[in-house]
Image (cartoon, rainbow, N blue to C red):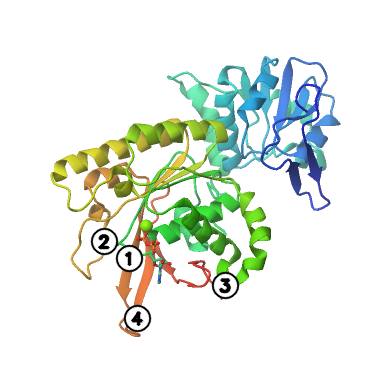
Amino acid sequence: MYGNETVGYKTLKSDCSEESFPFKGAKGIVINSRQKKSALIVAKLLDFLALVSEPLEHDIICLPHGQQNLPQELLPLLEQYDNLILWFDNDSVSWGNAKMFTKKLSEGRCSLIRPLENQPAPYICLKNGYNIPTIVKSAQPVSHASIVTFANLREDVLTELYNSDKVSGVKWERFPALNGILKGHRRGELSILTGPTGSGKTTFMSEYSLDLACSSVTTLWGSFEIRNQRLAKTMMTQMFCAPLEKNLNKFNEWADKFERLPIYFMTFHGQQPLNTVMEAVEHATYVHDVAHVIIDNVQFMLGISSSEAGFLDRFSRQDALIASFRNFATTCNCHVTLVIHPRKERDGEQLTPNSIFGGAKAAQEADNVLIIQHKMSHASLKLRKYLQVAKNRFSGDLGIMPLEFDKEALSFRTKQK
Ligand SMILES: Nc1ncnc2c1ncn2[C@@H]1O[C@H](COP(=O)(O)OP(=O)(O)O)[C@@H](O)[C@H]1O
Ligand SMILES: [Mg+2]
């Protein structure tokens, strides 16, 4: 509903999957109005139905696109409420998404149901016979002052402890080894991917981000090196594990499926001023609730060529870019991945975090450093590639993941043995 008008609908299938229509354009809410000044907001229809049957002093609202996006067109609809309580799933990813939405809804009137063991999503509470009104009463206001005491922090610490055994972040379907090392993809971090020219950085990042987008990580791609249509073609090939050229009759069917993924593309190409790009990124993040921004690659965006004179200027421009994105990742609680070329290395040498173009700043500011390495296998005399996690601020675990390339599917996906 939007006001008194029906603007779309949601379906709930017997396997509990949900869909919204229109798929991307649905800009209304599902509401059970009890004429209250306070509303309980959930992401799933199933949770909505669970709450509707409870004796609660709140309006019950279900968002049109789950945790993926809170369209800003909904904000006027929610203005009438003095108090909004968000209740999503009890894992750390949902917790991050809920906190993100409270920024848009203005934190002062928002409370959250903590993602604790005994406070799962409403539907599960209902199934397990938990007392839903008691859980709703335990909602905690979002603290938003710039200075907090431990009293404010203790709930956050407890939440982290409860969730520490769950993988803290969104997991990759195609790269189980990365889940083992990085533990998942989290909001608010800065990752850097480097590797020699032509080593597959763009191809790998395309699949890595596609995999996350398939798990509802809203993604904004800044492809400064290759055109968006080429990138989209690579991603579609990777999604369907088959070359499009040989499957032209399936194009429309596949394109319809691909279109449903939460992926946005910046229309920039080649060199752009940093401010222009930052403005576009911040705007898109606010409007679409972007959780992952990719810049491929930093040298193309800055228009740095190896022939450019004055490397001091190049370094300082790159440092400014890294500082801007670092700050953006933290303040907007969004993950940023920067693809950066390495400095010129002598042939055959392995790259290290210090090989990143521009020197120490990049490696210092990054939470994660990923490097595509080549290694000659002595046994088969074949050039093998692997992805090295050379820095990992979250858990400290380092390691490698072999990269085997499937040329038809443009995929590095780990084959099931
Ligand atoms: N491991 C690999 N083996 C063979 N070809 C690869 C491999 N990785 C990528 N490619 C191919 O090499 C080309 C360059 O890859 P690209 O991802 O653009 O590299 P980069 O972004 O590092 O310059 C692409 O055509 C890609 O399909
Ligand atoms: Mg590239």
The answer to whether the residues at label 4 and label 2 have Cβ atoms under 8 Å apart is no
Indicate the quadrant where residue 276 lies: top left
Q: Secondary structure at mark 1?
A: strand
Residue 106 at x, y percent in the picture: 57, 20
Residue 416: image tag: 3
Residue type for callout 1:
Gln
Measured in 3D between alpha carbons, the distance from the residue under mark 1 to the one under mark 2, in whole angstroms, is: 7 Å
**Where is residue 191 shown, x and y percent of the image?**
39, 47
Q: Amino acid at mark 3?
A: Gln
| Amino acid marked by disc 2 | Leu
- Residue in front for this viewpoint, 246 or 15: 246
Asked whether residue 182 appears in the rendered view, the answer is yes
Determine contact: label 1, label 2, CB under 8 Å: yes
N-terminal of the pair, mark 2 or mark 3, is 2
Residue at 68% x, 37% y is 25
- Mark carried by residue 70: none
Give the number of the mark in front: 3 or 4.
Answer: 4
- Rounded to the nearest whole Å, what is the CA distance between mark 3 and mark 4? 22 Å
* Label 3 close to label 4 by CB (< 8 Å): no
Precedes in sequence: disc 1 or disc 3: 1
Could you tell me residue 102's position as x and y percent?
58, 26
| Crowding near the residue tagged with mark 1, few <14, some 14–19, many ≥20 C-alpha atoms within 10 Å | many
**Left or right for 412, reference 110:** left
196 with respect to 157 (left or right): left
Disc 4: which residue? 382
Q: Which residue appears at 70% of the width and 39% of the height?
A: 120
Q: In terms of sequence position, does the residue under pointer 1 or pointer 4 come before the other?
A: 1
Q: Which image quadrant: the N terminus?
A: top right
Foreground: disc 1 or disc 3: 1
